[in-house]
Image (tube, helix red, strand yellow):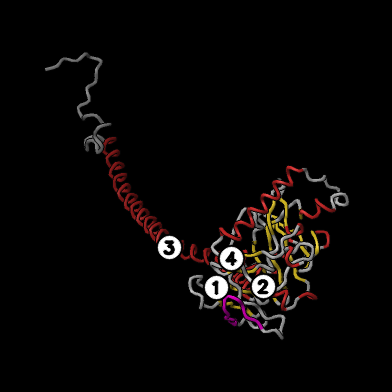
Amino acid sequence: MPVFSNGLKPMVDGNSLLNGGGSSNSPSSGKNSTSGGSGIIGGDTHGHSNSSSSDSVETKKSKRKGLVLIVAPIAGVAAAAFLLIPLYAYCFRRTKDGFQAPSSLVVHPRDPSDSDSTVKIAIANNANGSVSTLTGSGTGSRNSSAIGDSHAIEAGNLVISVQVLRNVTKNFAPENELGRGGFGVVYKGELDDGTKIAVKRMEAGVITNKALDEFQAEIAVLSKVRHRHLVALIGYSIEGNERILVYEYMPQGALSQHLFHWKSFGLEPLSWKRRLNIALDVARGMEYLHTLAHQSFIHRDLKSSNILLADDFRAKVSDFGLVKLAPNGEKSVVTKLAGTFGYLAPEYA
């Protein structure tokens, strides 16, 4: 039996802090018990209310999440359509405009292994958008009564729109003029990628059957041959009455300027070393035409004005309008008199 001091009052009812209900024997504890009971009942009601609110919030969140999952894809599709429709309209307009260019050409080259195959040229009519097709042999076909008719040309992806050439030459401005010849006027231009070009435009007054034959021959030859000492044909254009050839640009111009007009052009006279190099370059170009190409070509109009010089004064042969195709195995060809007086072979004199 424990012994306590006289001043200590024992609590036999237990710890009131640990007993939630307390003892019914103590008034205060009874009061606390009642209050505690009321608190427990009130606590159960409040917990049930919180649980219901929680369920309601979760339901609302679930519905909102489902709505977002439905609306988000629809909004994404609508936004994509909103962005793609103008892009499609722009591309369609460009395609339509490109197709309806005046007499724009699509040239389908014939098979070189088949001498009987034909060339097909699709011509888009600007007025009604219709497409007509011309066919012809490799030598070309035309109606001599109508200058606007097109020759059938053996060439691949060389067609350039007249509008593009107008843009790069500033509508064939006089300040871009490089020179004039029997064919027409040559203009300087620059493509969007920075490539400098020489644009030879046939004048309306010289569009004859002979001029058209030369135009066709130029394309036919230069679309088949490539050599470092032959001027490269970049493209051509046949739209309406326009006949245009596009070449690589040769900055130093024609050899004739440096030989005969160097003073008037403010040029330095050519040194003998440069003259020798030019002669060798021309000889290599002619050798390629005569013996190294897959077919033998005879230039028939080789002269100083048809020899063009690059920045480093390396020479290239140009102007293939009078070129004659030599039959395979033939060492001599009988042709009509062609060329420029003063530059003809001695036997013609």
- The numbered disc on residue 108 is 1
State the residue at coordinates (72%, 47%): 313
- The location of residue 26, given as percent across then percent down, is 24, 34
Q: Earlier in the sequence, mark 4 or mark 1?
A: 1
Q: What residue do we see at 57% from left, 75% from top?
A: 138
Specify start and end residues of the magenta stretch as a single range: 131-142
Secondary element at image label 3: helix
Q: Are marks 1 and 2 in contact (CB under 8 Å)?
A: no
Residue bearing mark 3: 67
Q: Amino acid at mark 3?
A: Leu
Give the crowd class for mark 4: few <14, some 14-19, many >=20 residues within 10 Å: few
Which percent across, then down, holds residue 153? 61, 73
Image location (x, y in percent) of residue 183: 76, 69
User: Image quadrant of residue 63?
Assistant: bottom left
Amino acid under disc 2: Thr
Q: Which residue is mark 4?
A: 331
Quarter of the C terminus within the rendering? bottom right
Q: Nearer the viewer, mark 4 or mark 1?
A: 4
Label 4 SS: loop
Q: Earlier in the sequence, mark 2 or mark 3?
A: 3
Instruction: Report the amino acid beneath label 1.
Output: His
Q: Which residue is mark 2?
A: 335
Label 4 to label 1: alpha-carbon separation: 33 Å
Q: Nearer the viewer, residue 16 or 108?
A: 108
In space, the residues marked 4 and 3 are separated at their CA atoms by: 88 Å
Q: Name which residue type carries label 4.
A: Lys
SS at circle 2? loop
3D distance between C-alphas at marks 2 and 3: 87 Å
Secondary structure, mark 1, is strand
